[in-house]
Image (cartoon, rainbow, N blue to C red):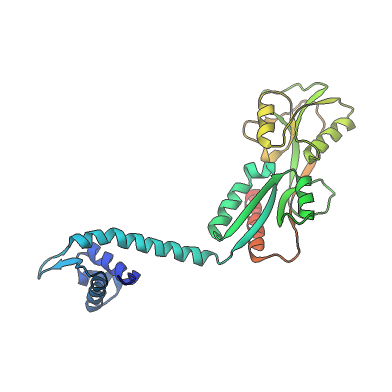
Amino acid sequence: MDMLDPEQLRTFLTVERAGGFTAAGRILGLRQSTVSGHIARLEQSIGRELFRRDTRNLALTADGAAMIGFARAILDAHAQADRYFAHSQLTGLIRLGASDDLVARQLPDVLVEFQNSHPGVDLELIVGLSEYLKNRMAAGELDLMVAKRLPGEKHGELLWRDRLVWAGRPGTLDVRDPVPIVTYPPPSLTRHAALRALEREGRTWRIACVSDSQLGLRAAALAGMGVVAHAESLLPAGLVTVADNGLPDLGELEFVLLRRRSVLSEPEQALCDAIIASTHRLRAA
């Protein structure tokens, strides 16, 4: 069987819906003879009759009824291929590092949008502490990185600044010394900021729970084991800011985009653009 022609299949489906060759021609902007020619060539290519014709009626044969499903599936596949190659010619692999709190809240929407626009690009996502990721990038193991830095640090392109807050389960009010801390392990930047602020105010503290994932921090804080220092806009579900508790101000944290090299590949530049555009939309909302 010859390759089925999408144009002929499209004409076939239009004839079936319109109920005749003349009506289909009006819909498609074709002469009736052209429509008839499409159907004749389609029938010749499959060696089957698709329509039973007489002077008054046009009806599908059994093979014609079967062709409806095949024609729709073939045209759908063509449309998907067109969308794939129209939206992105980019291919390649990007090794993206991201801090744990970003993966839980902001990054998924960025990755969904990027993959829909550039399905030929593969992503390797590495999640971890910002300082750990920075070391991996320095070793050439990451191409791009979205992570945190302390105010005053200069590495990376600033995406946004976020207020650091003390957070815990709802109802957490009076936090007494030694302050129970739920935290990432060293060299966590939020851990560093929390302990430095407590020491500056002369407060005593104890490490009540250590977890290398935000899921672990959230579980411990919701269980009432302690309070966690966290970026306010990225608080895990269920946790709330612990207000009026006498705990010291934590200041701000900065979220940045880092590139391993100054000249990016096309896929890397596309992902950078998606991350920056998403950040602007979210911060403007």
**Which residue appears at 26% of the width and 62% of the height?**
67
Residue nearer the viewer, 67 or 207: 67
In the visual, does 94 lie left or right of 205? left
Residue nearer the viewer, 184 or 281: 184
Residue nearer the viewer, 173 or 265: 265
Q: Is residue 64 above or below residue 125?
A: below
Residue 192 percent location from the top left of the image: 83, 37
**Which residue appears at 17% of the width and 62% of the height?**
61
Residue 36 percent location from the top left of the image: 22, 75
**Which residue appears at 72% of the width and 54% of the height?**
142
Q: Is residue 125 above or below residue 104?
A: below
Residue at far left of view: 55
In the visual, does 101 lie left or right of 33? right
Number of numbered tags placed on the structure image: 0
Residue 40 percent location from the top left of the image: 22, 74
Residue 167 percent location from the top left of the image: 71, 31
**Image quadrant in which you'd find residue 6:** bottom left
In the visual, does 22 lie left or right of 108? left
Q: Quadrant of the N terminus?
A: bottom left
**Which residue appears at 22% of the width and 62% of the height?**
64
Q: Is residue 153 above or below residue 101?
A: below
In the visual, does 81 lie left or right of 162? left
**Image quadrant in which you'd find residue 209:** top right
Residue nearer the viewer, 265 or 149: 265
